[in-house]
Amino acid sequence: IAVTGFYAETARAFLWAALSEAPFRLIRPLVLIACLGALVLTGRQPGGFDAIAAALVGTAIGLAILHFHMRPRLWPQIRLSPAILERRHWLSVSLPMLMPRAFNVVLIELDVVFVGFFLGAEATATYQAAARTSLLISMVFASVMSLGAPRIAALFASGDRTQLQKLLRSLVHLIFWPTLAGAVLLLASGQWV
């Protein structure tokens, strides 16, 4: 998963949007659905192990696609140079960033643990499904910003404030209106979802 993330972020740095987004947002979910759907069609009830195995297969397929598409593109652009390892520097930078991320993961799952503790398994399943469904709305923000962030950085670095302001204005509209439509749709169809 880490190597796939590395390739995806490298593709994002080179503004190869399709390659950067495909492994996690398209390939892995489709392979997961296909594998679990195949199990259901063959009459087998998929479990947690099956879901993890299918997710790993999807990640491996995404990694293979990234590797074979990016390697020919990267070799002409990256010159070979000796490796300079600064482990102490990188650990001093990355460990402080790890703590908030770890607490964020705990906070994201803590509500589910409390619902399970106080209300039981059935209420927890319903709550988890509702919470995950509502997270679909945030995909608009994540998608737009993952495509817009490199352009924001490039415009900021170039000092072109007028173009930066135009880009930010258009990104705000690309995020706000679909998110509002999704929220209204979710509120309107909430009892059936």
Image (cartoon, rainbow, N blue to C red):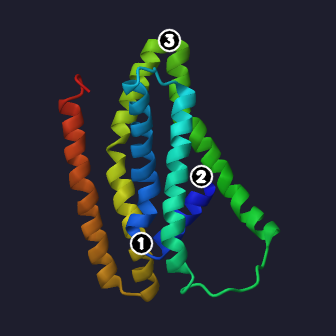
26 to 47, vertically: above or below: below
Q: Distance between the residues labelled 1 and 2?
A: 19 Å
Residue at x-position 39% and y-position 82%: 155
Mark 2: few, some, or many residues within 10 Å (few <14, many ≥20)? Answer: few
Q: Where is residue 56 in the image (x, y as percent from the top left)?
A: 56, 44
Q: Distance between the residues labelled 2 and 3?
A: 33 Å
What's under tag 1, amino acid-wise? Trp
N-term mark: 3 or 1: 1
Residue at x-position 44% and y-position 40%: 32
What's under tag 2, amino acid-wise? Ile
Determine which of the numbered discs, if any, sits on residue 16 in the image: 1
Determine which of the numbered discs, if any, sits on residue 156 in the image: none
Look at the numbered discs 2 and 3 and tell me whether their residues touch, using CB distance below 8 Å.
no
Q: What residue is shown with label 3?
A: 120
The reply, left or right, for residue 107 in relation to residue 171 is right
Secondary structure of the residue carrying tag 2 is loop
What's under tag 3, amino acid-wise? Gly
The reply, left or right, for residue 134 in relation to residue 9 is left
Nearer-the-camera pick, 66 or 181: 66
Secondary structure of the residue carrying tag 1 is loop
Determine which of the numbered discs, if any, sits on residue 1 in the image: 2
Residue at x-position 37% and y-position 26%: 41
